[in-house]
Amino acid sequence: MEVIENLFGLDEHKLETYQMIARAFVIFFVALLLIRVSGIRTLGKQSAFDNLTALILGAIMGRAIVSAEQPFFGSILATLVIMVLHRVVAWITYRSKKMGIILKGRELLLIKNGEPNKKNMKQTHITREDILETLRKDVNVPSLDTIKEVYLERSGEISFIKKT
């Protein structure tokens, strides 16, 4: 037990380089395991819910590597709890559309047939110029002439429905 305490600097006020390296090694594999628990979508380009979970994961695990003041194994357990909660919330929102809207939000219509939905655009702080920029980058067209609808998706991305 003393070897583990020394290796990970469990009772230290200041970590040595080798202790941070040992912590990083363990945290890397623990993070891989936790991603398996929560699901691969946690680090994918998904909703704000997924991004928030990834941000929390990074913050806790990063500090677990370099901070002697943050309990090492407590950090791992706290991260496990967050990842399990992520998985549970994902399951709940999969099973219930209403809970999905409450916990993850829903898409917002920004433009329909060339007419902006000013309320939604104001609420989301998205300008016509923001929409046109995304249109040029993602759809490779310069104007809304060929677009029927524009949405702000739950992921925060802008999507386009072309006219048929």
Image: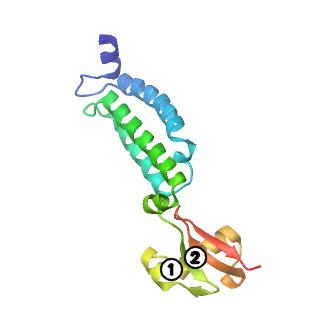
Q: Mark 1 highlights which residue?
A: 127
Image quarter in which the N terminus is found: top left
- How is this picture coloured? rainbow
Which residue carries the number 2 mark? 131
State the residue in front, 148 or 103: 103
Left or right, residue 23 beside residue 13: right
Residue 81 rendering spot, x and y as whole percentages? 38, 38
Name the side, left or right, on which 118 lies relative to 131.
left
Whole-angstrom CA distance, mark 2 to mark 1, is 7 Å
Q: Which percent across, then down, holds residue 34?
A: 48, 35
Dot 2 and dot 1 residues touching (CB under 8 Å): yes
Figure quadrant of the C terminus = bottom right
Crowd around label 1: few <14 · some 14–19 · many ≥20 (10 Å): some
Under tag 1, what secondary structure?
Answer: loop
Indicate the position of residue 11 as horizontal and vertical percent values: 24, 22
Outermost top residue? 2
Query: Foreground: 8 or 51?
Result: 51
Image quadrant assignment for residue 140: bottom right
- Amino acid, disc 1: Thr
Quarter of image, res 62: top left
Q: In this view, does 44 lie above or below 151?
A: above
Residue drawn at the location 49% of the way across and 76% of the way down: 126
**Which residue is more in the foreground, 149 or 125?**
149
